[in-house]
C-alpha cells in the first residue's frame, strides 16, 4: 500500500514539474492521473508535508526568483509565465514569500529557493525509532545531510549553501551535529550549540514527520547534553505565508514564543523550551 502511495505522489510531482509554467492545481493533476482528487490531496499532504497548492506555489515562485536573477525577462513577463494575471498580483505574493519585491530581489542578485523538487523515497524501512539511534554526524555524512537540506529547503529561508556547508564542517568537528538514518536514508539532522542551549538547524525528512522525530532529537539533547537547561531555536514569525507548519510543530512540542529577530535579513522569532 505504501509503495502504491509513493508511486502516485511521485507521478503527481513529475506531472507538476513538467507543467510548472502552465496552469496547475489539484483538480488538473488528479484528472491527469485519473485519480480521486480528495484521496490525492490526502496522500500528497501526508507524504510531502504540505498540499499540492502550497507545493505548486512555492515551486513557481522559486523558478520566478531564478528568472529574476539569471535572466533579463521583464517582471511582467515573469509574472505571466508564473501564472499570475498581473504584475501587481505577482508582486504581492512574491513579497509575502520572499519579504522583498521582485525588483529589489533582482537588484540584490542573491537567489535562494523557496522550494526544490521533492521526489519521495520508495521502500522505506521504519527502524526502531528511539533517541539512542541518533548519533554524532561525521564528515562522510555531509552529502546525505545536504540531500535532506534540499528536501526541506522550506525550513531554510535565505539559505546560502556554501556558508551552510562551511558551518556544518565546524559543527561536525566540534561534535555539535546529530544525525538519524533509516536504511541509509537520512531522516533527521540537528546542529546545536550546547554552550548557549540553542538549536541552530533542524530538519526532518517529509515522509517521516508523522513519526514524531523532532521530539526524539529534543529528548536526546535534553537528556544527554542540556539536562536542566532551556533550549532555544528560531523559526518563522506568526502569519508568515512562507511557513509550511514549523511554528505549529514547535508550539505542539512545548516551545514558547520569545523575542522577534531579523536573521540574514529575514524576519524570524525566537522560541524557548523550558526544562
Image: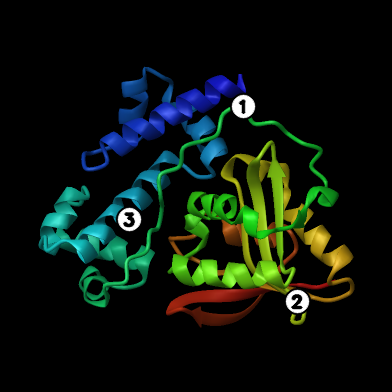
Quadrant in which residue 233 is drawn: bottom right
| Gap in angstroms between the C-alphas marked 2 and 3 | 33 Å
Q: Are marks 2 and 3 in contact (CB under 8 Å)?
A: no
Q: Is residue 131 left or right of residue 92?
A: right
Q: Residues within 10 Å of mark 3 (few under 14, many from 20)?
A: many
| Gap in angstroms between the C-alphas marked 2 and 1 | 36 Å
* Residue at which label 2 appears: 197
Specify the color scheme.
rainbow
* Residue at which label 3 appears: 62
Q: Residue at x 41, y 53 (%)?
A: 115
Question: Closer to the observer: label 1 or label 3?
Answer: 1
Q: What quarter of the picture does the C terminus occupy? A: bottom right
Q: Is residue 1 left or right of residue 23?
A: right
Residue 123, numbered circle:
1
Residue 211 point in image, percent of width and height: 71, 42
Q: Is residue 79 above or below residue 240?
A: above
Give whichever of 181, 79 is nearer the camera: 181
Amino acid at each position: 500500500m505504501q509503495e502504491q502511495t509513493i508511486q502516485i505522489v511521485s507521478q503527481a510531482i513529475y506531472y507538476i514539474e513538467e507543467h510548472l509554467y502552465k496552469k496547475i492545481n489539484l483538480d488538473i493533476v488528479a484528472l491527469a492521473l485519473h485519480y480521486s482528487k480528495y484521496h490525492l490531496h490526502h496522500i500528497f499532504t501526508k507524504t510531502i508535508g504540505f498540499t499540492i497548492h502550497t507545493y505548486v506555489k512555492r515551486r513557481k515562485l522559486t523558478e520566478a526568483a531564478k528568472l529574476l536573477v539569471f535572466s533579463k525577462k521583464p517582471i511582467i513577463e515573469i509574472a505571466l509565465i508564473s501564472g499570475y494575471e498581473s504584475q501587481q498580483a505577482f508582486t504581492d505574493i512574491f513579497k509575502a514569500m520572499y519579504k522583498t519585491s521582485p525588483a529589489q530581489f533582482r537588484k540584490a542578485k542573491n537567489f535562494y529557493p523557496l522550494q526544490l523538487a521533492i521526489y519521495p523515497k520508495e521502500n522505506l524501512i521504519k527502524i526502531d525509532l528511539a533517541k539512542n539511534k541518533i548519533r554524532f554526524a561525521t564528515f562522510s555524512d555531509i552529502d546525505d545531510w545536504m540531500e535532506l537540506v534540499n528536501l526541506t529547503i522550506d525550513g531554510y529561508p535565505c539559505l546560502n549553501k556554501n556558508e551552510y556547508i562551511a558551518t556544518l564542517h565546524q559543527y561536525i568537528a566540534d561534535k555539535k551535529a546529530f544525525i538519524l538514518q533509516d536504511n541509509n536514508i537520512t531522516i533527521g539532522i540537528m546542529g546545536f550549540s550546547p554552550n548557549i542551549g540553542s538549536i541552530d538547524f533542524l530538519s526532518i525528512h517529509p515522509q517521516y514527520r508523522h513519526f514524531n522525530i523532532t521530539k526524539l532529537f529534543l529528548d536526546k539533547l535534553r537528556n544527554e547534553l542540556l539536562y536542566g537547561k532551556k533550549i532555544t531555536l528560531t523559526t518563522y514569525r506568526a502569519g508568515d505565508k512562507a511557513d509550511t507548519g514549523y511554528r505549529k510543530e514547535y508550539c505542539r512540542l512545548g516551545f514558547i514564543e520569545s523575542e522577534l529577530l531579523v536573521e540574514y535579513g529575514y524576519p524570524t522569532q525566537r522560541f524557548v523550551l523550558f526544562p
